[in-house]
């Protein structure tokens, strides 16, 4: 997919991680290209910047980020899914056992370390791009690189914040240890190492806002509003991400503002006839930004890809061929909710139910499984992963308008998603007061099932997680396990970082 791929190994110094080894191994300070990009051109030429940007997208493919965990672990922690124990994976996460969340059970640094590596790469690009000699004709290209660096840093800091911190206004006072450390200058050598403490959550969101505003500013100066969607950060995706971040911040006026801006972009909501088929297309047609896996070498494989995690099926409707493990499947309650609205003849109205079907018995008892990920590029376990879809914008705006007291506007956006999904529009009489909010949240759950939203939606709204006893019984919002544990190697090298309460 990408012309250049490069790993800036200096990012191993980020947050003081591996400081001891980094200080004794000068090789860690070298730029090591993975393809034809020469290390001498790294961060000093337009092509070098291009290669470094692509390196960040490669980081996002990691199993502990969007290769799996940002979606599957989120689903395991929440109430949409149950583990099958066919491979043993995600069982502890589904039971909400402490220290089993977002890669920390299987990876030394999990999502924390990988995200900070990527943030450092963005920092290095932002530190150096001002001295790179772009030709006048390449001004738009430079602006696009800048926009992507700001967009990616904002995305990564928001992901870190919602994993490891409370949302603004939702802190448990006696348990709150702050937000995630902010590093805004690249670590290119030992002299740049800093060991910051955890700022207030509000300060993290202030920085995310600043990055998104910077990204919008430079993307807006490009010759096209959406030239690289959905494989790369772009203006429409940045507006959409801003609406998401503002929703977490309870900044409802800005949710409406930026969702509306993104809805006006070139990528549109799918219609009823094309929605299900869109999940079988080379890319999800609603994707404003997705992490793309294009080559066989990028295949995460049969143990931890999203396809193997969610289904045993190789193809839709073929129960004779077993591919993956189907480690995480919908709960009965989730399927019942999808089937709740029926026609006069008893037919299920919600077309999204078609994305869940009975798997094979090749690895044990068959379950109804999620089939949103089935090797879109023609190769098993190789899927593009939507990070932001257009559907989210209507539901973000609906929720924000509800809290702003604009019930009619909230209902209008809700009905857009309901009708697209094959459900009848509801009236203001049917959905008055809190019933409207409940239906908005219900549609979010059904629309984004197995895309990693549900856990974070429960967390940002302070709701308890209710599960069957076999899944551990769930969590009350005040339970310390609502926040992930910061990796031990980070705490051992940066004494200024406080571990989350309870660990």
Image (spheres, rainbow, N blue to C red):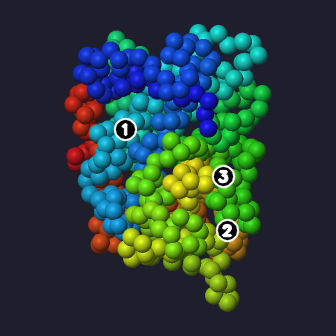
Viewer can see residue 501:
yes
Residue 22 location (% of width, % of height): 30, 20
Where residue 200 is drawn, which disc sits there?
A: none
Q: Give the residue number, with chain letter if any, for mark 2.
A: 421
State the CA–CA distance, disc 3 to disc 1: 30 Å
Q: Give the residue number, with chain letter if any, for mark 3.
A: 282
Front residue of 425/265: it is: 265
- Looking at the image, do the residues carrying marks 2 and 3 touch, with CB atoms under 8 Å apart? no
Front residue of 443/64: it is: 64
Residue 503 location (% of width, % of height): 22, 46
For image coordinates 69% across by 23% down, the residue present is 141
Residue 417 location (% of width, % of height): 67, 63
What is the secondary structure assignment of the residue under circle 1? Answer: helix
- Looking at the image, do the residues carrying marks 2 and 1 touch, with CB atoms under 8 Å apart? no
Mark 3, mark 1: which one is toward the viewer?
Answer: 3
State the CA–CA distance, disc 2 to disc 1: 36 Å
Front residue of 122/301: it is: 301
């Amino acid at each position: 997919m990408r012309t250049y791929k490069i790993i800036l190994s200096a990012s191993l110094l980020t947050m003081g991680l591996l400081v001891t080894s980094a200080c004794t191994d000068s090789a860690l300070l070298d730029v090591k290209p993975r393809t034809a990009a020469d290390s001498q051109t790294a961060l000093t030429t337009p092509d070098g910047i291009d290669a470094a940007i692509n390196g960040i997208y490669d980081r996002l493919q990691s199993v502990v980020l969007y290769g799996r965990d940002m979606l599957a672990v989120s689903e395991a922690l929440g109430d949409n899914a149950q583990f099958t124990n066919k491979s043993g994976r995600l069982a502890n996460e589904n039971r909400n056992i402490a220290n089993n969340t977002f890669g920390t059970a299987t990876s030394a640094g999990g999502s924390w370390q990988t995200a900070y590596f990527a943030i450092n790469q963005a920092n290095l690009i932002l530190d150096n791009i001002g001295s790179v000699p772009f030709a006048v004709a390449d001004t738009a290209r430079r602006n696009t690189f800048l926009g992507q660096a700001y967009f990616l840093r904002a995305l990564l800091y928001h992901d870190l914040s919602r994993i490891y911190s409370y949302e603004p206004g939702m802190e448990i006072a006696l348990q709150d240890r702050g937000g995630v450390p902010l590093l805004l200058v690249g670590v290119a050598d030992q002299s740049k190492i800093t060991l910051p403490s955890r700022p207030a959550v509000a300060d993290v969101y202030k920085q995310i806002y600043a990055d998104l505003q910077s990204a919008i500013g430079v993307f807006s100066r490009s010759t096209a509003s959406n030239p690289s969607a959905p494989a790369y950060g772009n203006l429409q995706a940045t507006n959409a991400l801003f609406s998401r971040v503002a929703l977490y911040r309870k900044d409802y006026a800005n949710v409406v503002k930026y969702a509306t801006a993104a809805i006006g972009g070139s990528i549109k909501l799918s219609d009823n006839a094309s929605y299900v088929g869109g999940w079988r297309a080379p890319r999800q047609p609603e994707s404003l930004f997705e992490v793309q896996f294009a080559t066989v070498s990028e295949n995460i494989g049969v143990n931890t890809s999203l396809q193997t995690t969610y289904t045993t099926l190789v193809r839709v409707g073929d129960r004779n061929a077993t591919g993956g493990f189907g480690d995480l499947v919908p709960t009965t309650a989730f399927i019942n909710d999808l089937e709740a609205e029926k026609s006069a003849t008893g037919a299920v109205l919600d077309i999204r139910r078609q994305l869940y079907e009975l798997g094979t018995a090749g690895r044990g008892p068959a379950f109804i499984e999620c089939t949103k990920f089935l090797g879109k590029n023609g190769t098993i376990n190789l899927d593009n992963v939507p990070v932001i879809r257009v559907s989210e914008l209507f539901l973000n705006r609906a929720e924000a308008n509800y809290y702003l007291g604009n019930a009619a506007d909230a209902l209008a956006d809700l009905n857009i998603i309901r009708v697209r999904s094959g459900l009848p529009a509801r009236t203001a009489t049917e959905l008055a007061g809190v019933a409207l909010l409940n239906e908005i949240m219900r549609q979010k759950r059904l629309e984004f099932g197995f895309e990693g939203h549900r856990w974070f939606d429960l967390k940002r709204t302070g709701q308890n997680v209710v599960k069957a006893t076999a899944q551990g019984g769930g969590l009350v919002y005040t339970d310390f396990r609502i926040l992930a544990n910061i990796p031990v190697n980070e705490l051992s090298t940066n004494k200024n970082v406080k571990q989350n309460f309870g660990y």
